[in-house]
Image (cartoon, helix red, strand yellow):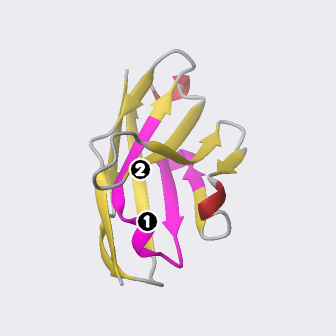
Amino acid sequence: QVQPVESGGGLVQAGGSLRLSCATSGNTLSINTIAWFRQAPGKQQRELVAHITRNNITNYKSSVKGRFTVSRDNAKNTVYLQLNSLKPDDTAVYYCAATDGETWYWGQGTQVTVSS
């Protein structure tokens, strides 16, 4: 079992920045990938924003490339998502999820609201 807990969301003006954190606990050695998803208001599905593997390979949704950066601090069992040049379309609940290759473990989400 892995327990991800997100923090760092908030209200920011367009063009601003936020840093989200995902602290993991439990069987963290089993994790091979941690991903950030988001669910925009009124949307049914969550979309993949970025992920980072155990070997620090990263990947991003095209619309956030160059603006968002995912990184990890293994000593703290924490993954970060730096959000820069935020746009109103980035408004969503951001979820952190960790997988051991078989099961996805989800956090409770953190709200990011970008005002125009």
Q: In terms of image quadrants, where is residue 14?
A: bottom left
Q: Would you say residue 77 is visible in this rendering?
A: no
Number of on-image labels: 2
Estimate how packed mark 2 is, as few (under 14), some (14 to 19) or many (20 or more) residues with alpha carbons within 10 Å: many
Q: Image point 46% across, 18% down: which residue?
A: 103
Residue 90 disc label: 1
Q: Would you say residue 38 is visible in this rendering?
A: yes
Which residue ends up furthest to the top in the rendered image? 102
Residue 71 disc label: none
Helix, strand or loop for disc 2 = strand
- Please tell me whether residue 78 belongs to the stretch shown in magenta: yes
Helix, strand or loop for disc 1 = helix
Q: Which residues are magenta?
A: 71-97
- Please tell me whether residue 66 belongs to the stretch shown in magenta: no
The answer to whether the residues at label 2 and label 1 have Cβ atoms under 8 Å apart is yes
Q: Image point 48% across, 44% down: which residue?
A: 47
- State the image coordinates of residue 51 (x, y, percent, origin top left): 59, 44
- State the image coordinates of residue 77 (x, y, percent, origin top left): 48, 43
Amino acid type of disc 2? Arg
Q: Image point 43% across, 65% down: which residue?
A: 90
Quadrant that contains the N terminus: top left
Q: Image point 52% across, 42% down: which residue?
A: 35
Mark 2 lies on residue? 38
- State the image coordinates of residue 102 (x, y, percent, origin top left): 52, 15
